[in-house]
Amino acid sequence: MNDQYSACFSGCAAKVAKNNNNGVQCLYGQCGGEGYTGPTECEPSTVCTPRDATWSECRPEGYQFPSADGGDDGVVDSSVDQCALVSKQCGGALWTGPTCCQGMAVCLPVRPATPTPAVA
């Protein structure tokens, strides 16, 4: 696992994590936001939905993010089990949360961002 950060992926998202999805982002994958340079097209049946200025992700059509004070960060759904939901953290340096993923999802390392060279 990536020493810094690992997250749960399933189906389409596992292909994205392995750079094998032809530039299409999957359900719960980032598709926009300030400074984002990755895929902006979402898999079928999902649309790129903004959460705030820095983050948009592929969600089912009609989905709206809860308000900032809405609470739940989606890490664990205790009514199902104590494993992380798809797209949520499941490992990494100093991580003390769940290390398993719900359903058929798998915990994969997330590639560290490539630093952008400073522009003079």
Image (tube, rainbow, N blue to C red):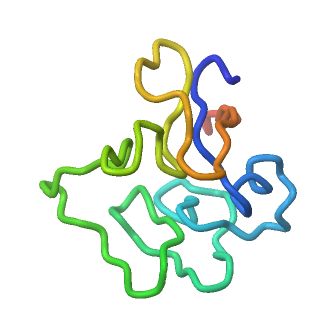
Residue in the foreground of this view, choosing between 4 and 54: 4
Position of residue 18 in the picture relative to residue 50 (left or right): right
Q: Residue at x 46, y 65 (%)?
A: 56
Residue in the foreground of this view, choosing between 26 and 40: 26
Quadrant in which residue 120 is drawn: top right
Image location (x, y in percent) of residue 117 = 67, 34
Quadrant in which residue 55 is drawn: bottom left
Image location (x, y in percent) of residue 97 = 41, 25
Image location (x, y in percent) of residue 61 = 46, 86
Residue in the foreground of this view, choosing between 48 and 85: 85
Position of residue 80 in the picture relative to residue 2 (left or right): left
Q: Is 3 drawn above or below residue 83 in the view shown?
A: above
Position of residue 99 in the picture relative to residue 38 (left or right): left
In this view, the residue farthest toward the top is: 94
Position of residue 7 in the picture relative to residue 19 (left or right): left
Q: Quadrant of the N terminus?
A: top right
Residue 115 can be seen in this image: no
How many marks can you see?
0
Q: Is 90 drawn above or below residue 105 in the view shown?
A: above
Q: Residue at x 46, y 29 (%)?
A: 98
Q: Residue at x 52, y 76 (%)?
A: 48
Q: Residue at x 53, y 50 (%)?
A: 87
Residue 86 can be seen in this image: yes
Image location (x, y in percent) of residue 66 = 23, 66
In this view, the residue farthest toward the front is: 80
